[in-house]
Amino acid sequence: MNEQKEIVLTKEGMAKLREELEYLKTEKRKEVSEKIREARSFGDLSENAEYDEAKNEQAEVESRINTIINMLKYARVIDDSEIENDVVGLGITVEIREVGEDEKETYSIVTTTEADPDNNKISQDSPVGKALIGHIQGDIVTVETPAGKIDFEILSITKHSA
């Protein structure tokens, strides 16, 4: 039997998944259907690149919808009471600074599902996330990177704002 693993999410992560699912089911499906309808009007489907592209996009959208539905089915939202205020962990925003540097960086520790490095949301399973987990303000943490080891000082720890 295929056992599905529990998926742990923050409240924000759960809300974003639901929002994406709603968008895909309502707007994106209609958009792709229109592309398919338009491509069909071009005639011969056997050599119709627009039709093939639209059908591929439709398959991707349906696959993502199914993935999200499955994720939501097995999702567990982290309760705020599970999040400690003074230890880096899931649901925490941490401000760090590379030892010897002035520039500060702020990261939210999230699940792999919610990771978005462009918006400073790093996975608990990323190299930096793994290194920071379990540490407290003032700790110096060494992160193993492809460029070598980097030491970071934890400047502050706060719960995500929901």
Image (cartoon, helix red, strand yellow):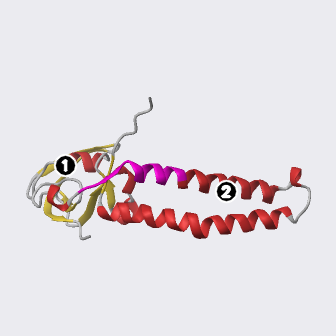
Q: Residue at x 25, y 64 (%)?
A: 105
Q: Which residue is mark 1?
A: 133
| Amino acid type indicated by mark 2 | Glu
Q: Is 109 left, or right, of 49 in this rendering?
A: left
Left or right side of 146 for 68: right
Between 98 and 137, which is closer to the camera in this rendering?
137
- For this view, does 156 lie left or right of residue 44? left
Residue 47's place in the image compared with 26, above or below, is above
Q: Residue at x 15, y 62 (%)?
A: 157
At 29% from the left and 59% from the top, the residue drawn is 10
Q: CA distance from mark 1 to mark 2?
A: 38 Å
Q: Examine the image and state in which quarter residue 24 appears.
A: bottom right
Q: Is residue 104 left or right of residue 9?
A: left
- Looking at the image, tell me whether mark 1 or mark 2 is earlier in sequence order: 2
Looking at the image, residue 64 lies above or below residue 2? below
Image location (x, y in percent) of residue 29: 63, 64
Quadrant assignment, res 145: top left
Residue drawn at (19%, 49%), measured in percent from left and top? Answer: 133
Front label number (1 vs 2):
2
Instruction: Decide: is 135 above or below 160.
Output: above
Dot 1 amino acid type: Ile
In percent of width and height, residue 79 lies at: 21, 58
Residue receiving disc 2: 57
Provide the secondary structure element on which disc 1 rests: loop
Question: Where the C terminus falls, by quadrant?
Answer: bottom left
Crowd around label 1: few <14 · some 14–19 · many ≥20 (10 Å) = some
Q: Element under label 2? A: helix
Q: Magenta residues, as a range?
A: 66-78
Which SS does the magenta portion mostly show? helix
